[in-house]
Image: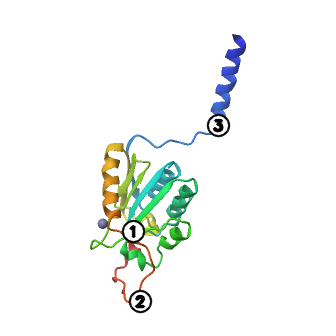
Amino acid sequence: MKRWMCLYLVLGLLAGCVRQEPSIPQGVQVYFSPEGGCTEAVVDALNHATNSVLVQAYSFTSEPIARALVDAQKRHVRVQVILDRSQRTEKYSEADFLMHYGIPPLIDAKHAIAHNKIMVIDGYLILTGSFNFTKAAEEKNAENLLVINDPVLADKYTRNWHAHQAHAEPYDRPRQSESPRGRQSSHY
Ligand SMILES: [Zn+2]
């Protein structure tokens, strides 16, 4: 009996030595930019993804977030991205980067602007707010990001994501006949 107790004690100590990744918190977290940890929160959430990531983004120029998406894809997480049509002509868009790493984004050109900034991770975690997935949003702008752990709400976002997916088009580089819309979207 004593031997078993020693074994449990040793196993317990060993478990304590293994570094546990902090889990995604329950409820709702909020982050504010500039420099308030928004990008870090997005990357952290993506690093915990095990099954699926749905993204809707207006502007997408954040290299760390693009890399975290690619890393998730490499872990066999299914990553699907819908972007605003401005990303076809956006100078610093990460759309090409995603394309290159096997995440071909879709373009939602059905609206004046596809202004959602959303991620749904593993069907339970929602990231949304004014925070665009951009360097400017992290470093220069006043933005907010909510991280919401709520499977019921996530289901509503997932259904809305698929509604936009239904009329989205494959991403391609700008056609000669198509002129840029003249917005300075890199400011977002
Ligand atoms: Zn749409």
Identify which amino acid the numbered label 2 is placed on.
Answer: Gln
Left/right placement of residue 150 relative to residue 61 reads: left
| Residue of label 2 | 176
Left/right placement of residue 63 relative to residue 10 reads: left
Ligand 1's quadrant: bottom left
- Using the numbered discs, state the Cα–Cα distance from disc 2 to disc 1 in whole angstroms: 20 Å
Taking the image as drawn, is residue 41 in sight?
yes
- Residue extending furthest toward the front: 166
Q: Which of the pair 79/149 is nearer the observer?
A: 79
| Residue of label 3 | 18
- The crowding category of the residue bearing disc 2, from other C-alpha atoms within 10 Å (few below 14, some 14 to 19, many at least 20), is few
Scheme of image coloration = rainbow
- The crowding category of the residue bearing disc 1, from other C-alpha atoms within 10 Å (few below 14, some 14 to 19, many at least 20), is many
Looking at the image, is mark 2 or mark 1 earlier in the sequence?
A: 1
- Residue extending furthest toward the bottom: 177
Identify which amino acid the numbered label 1 is placed on.
Answer: Leu
Residue 83: quadrant of the picture: bottom left
Q: What x and y, as percent, mark residue 115?
A: 32, 67
Nearest to viewer (mark 2 / mark 1): 2
Looking at the image, is mark 1 or mark 3 earlier in the sequence?
A: 3
Q: Assign the N terminus to one quadrant of the image.
A: top right
- Using the numbered discs, state the Cα–Cα distance from disc 1 to disc 3 in whole angstroms: 39 Å
Q: Are marks 1 and 3 in contact (CB under 8 Å)?
A: no
Residue 182, placed above or below residue 99: below
The residue at the point 34 percent across, 61 percent down is: 130
Identify which amino acid the numbered label 3 is placed on.
Answer: Val
Residue 130, placed above or below residue 14: below
Q: Which of the pair 174/170 is nearer the observer?
A: 170
Which mark is drawn over residue 83?
Answer: 1
Callout 3: SS: loop
Q: Is mark 2 within 8 Å of ligand 1?
A: no
Nearest to viewer (mark 1 / mark 3): 1
